[in-house]
Amino acid sequence: MAGPAVVDARGIRKSYRMGEVEVEALRGVDLRIDPGEFSCIMGASGSGKSTLLNIVGCLDRPSSGTFSLMDRSVDSMDDGDLAEVRNRFIGFVFQTFNLLPRSSALQNVELPLVYARVQSRERRERAMAMLEKVGLASRAGHRPNQLSGGERQRVAIARALVTRPALLLADEPTGNLDSRTGRVIMEMFHSIHSEGNTILLVTHDPEIAREAGRVVRIKDGLIESDTRS
Amino acid sequence: MLPEAAASALGSLRNNRLRSALTSLGVMVGVTSVVSLVGLVTGLSNYVGEQFDTVVGARVFEISRFNSGFDDMESWLRSRTWPRLTADDAERLSEMMTTAEGVTWRVGTSRSVSSGGRTAEGIWVRGLAPTEPDVGGTTMAMGRFFTDAEDGNRARVCVLGSSLADSLGTPSSLVGSDVSIGGERFTVIGIAEPLGSIFGRALDDYAAVPFSTFVSLFATPGRDVEIAVLPRADVSQEESQEEARQILRRLRGIPWDGEDNFYITNQQAMLDSMNQIMGGAAIVTIGIAAISLLVGGIGIMNIMLVSVTERTREIGIRRALGATRGDIVSQFLVESVVISLIGGVLGLLAGFAIVTAADALTPVPASASPFAALLAIAFSSGVGLVFGIYPSWKAAGLDPVEALRYE
């Protein structure tokens, strides 16, 4: 593959203590994602896919193994560096949208730019442009509870993309939506992908997985299969 | 970053209006008490200083057997074993002192005074030496003070304080008329200029009679007197006090290594002891105010902890979007300082209102100083900061993954 890998994970293990018991969520995972890929992680609940997503999103650290994002080793970074990496390179889209309930759509989209120390005027312009792109410019002043589920997820996508991240991480993005709205959101992911963005999507729905160019199946903390179509 | 944190803080306070208001109220009560007590105590202490300035001649010192200040039981009992301080002591002092402009002595008791059909009860009847005007600075509004001769032959003459004269009738028609003091007939020969009041107590509700007349009618001979000395203009008060002390020690036969069996006090000493009391009162009251501020601070901490728990998920979202621990800390700290500052500003206004009311309604010239305002703002933001640290630290320490999963 040409160019640096977006994600390069080798021998990732992750164990938790649950009271007395040591639980191994990941037991040696290698994963490489190249720029422009639309990949999908599939697995049952408890398979370790969420743990892997958290590590790829730099929200969590592996117990052992090495992990690089855009050719930068994350292993020895401190908490502040990780926050900056999340801010600059990762865009998150969650199943439950995770918008700040008391902030307007525009304020929600602006939030990552606040932490990137972007000046308020530029922040507003970029957030507004992003909302236009997801077709919600007219809803900029609305709070999440004044928006439909699909609209909320579109705001969340706008928020994830506003920093122009290297990797868009989506955790069951259609899980809380009816199938027609889910379809709209998936179309949006395809159009984002076609603009050259790298997407990693987690799902347990085979219908969704089929739309991705690559499917990584996880079971019991190990990669079971990795197929490109 | 700070403007965003402030905006976010105000937003979150708006969303919990009642809760924020109640929390601010706690700080407000504390700041109100600090501001008003500082204002009142400062006013009171200025007031005391002014009172002493107007009433007591600055250079006069007084000698008495009992400590005129604020003393303990033990020293009072010790004073009782000492020989009395008499008019004879005072006269000898007057003869022997070279540094004194004047020496006078006083006694007093309480009697009723009546004139025509009017009676004033509980009037302070003073037995004064004829030298009183020279030392005490008594000046006459009308008539005259009594003479040496009148004191020598125990004349039944009296001088009335201005407010007593007012309560007995028309002052001008009183001069030359007879009044009854404790059942004894006296002729009014003069009315004194008003002195005003000290701590709200009238100083002009008195009748003054010659010392020897007083002793013959109202008191046993040889009873205690209070001696007042005005030093000469060209000697220092300390020098004159020391001379009086040495003469009295000799008169009263105190060995060279014995302690004085009398007290000498002056305005400065009284002011000092007054200030000591005021200082103690100030520490106590401001201590109490500080406790209420502390309670306000605990209220803030409590609410901030609740807020951190309620907003765990929000913290997780912010962390996922790139907020550092420092960002989270400043967000919650700013919020806590804002709540506290709002309380501080309201408390400042309430404190000013109380101080202004006290100034208008009491003789105490209370005033809220810019210092008190500064103190209030510094205290309230300090309280917000200190009591916000732990909740903010707790918020920043949350694990992003756990926080995002929090329901």
Image (tube, coloured by chain):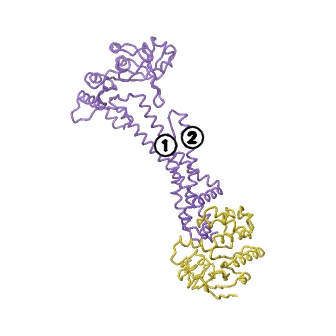
Q: Does label 1 lie on the same chain as label 2? A: yes
Give me the chain that's purple. B
Do callouts 2 and 1 mark residues in contact (Cβ within 8 Å)?
A: no
Q: Residue furthest right?
A: A180
Q: Residue at x 33, y 36 (%)?
A: B75
In the foreground, A153 or B72: A153
Q: Secondary structure at mark 1?
A: helix
Question: On the rendered image, what quadrant is the N terminus of chain B found in?
Answer: bottom right
Where residue B186 sits in the image (x, y, percent)? 42, 13
Q: Residue at x 49, y 44 (%)?
A: B371
User: Label 2, on which residue?
Assistant: B353
Residue B255 position (above or below residue B144):
below
Give me the chain that's yellow. A
Crowding near the residue tagged with mark 2, few <14, some 14–19, many ≥20 C-alpha atoms within 10 Å: some
User: Label 1, on which residue?
Assistant: B38
- Seen in the image, is A43 located left or right of residue B41? right
Q: Secondary structure at mark 2?
A: helix
Residue A50 position (above or below residue A135):
below
Identify which amino acid the numbered label 2 is placed on: Ala
Name which of mark 2 and mark 1 comes first in the sequence.
Answer: 1
Identify which amino acid the numbered label 1 is placed on: Val
- Seen in the image, is B191 located left or right of residue A12? left
Question: On the rendered image, what quadrant is the C terminus of chain B found in?
Answer: bottom right
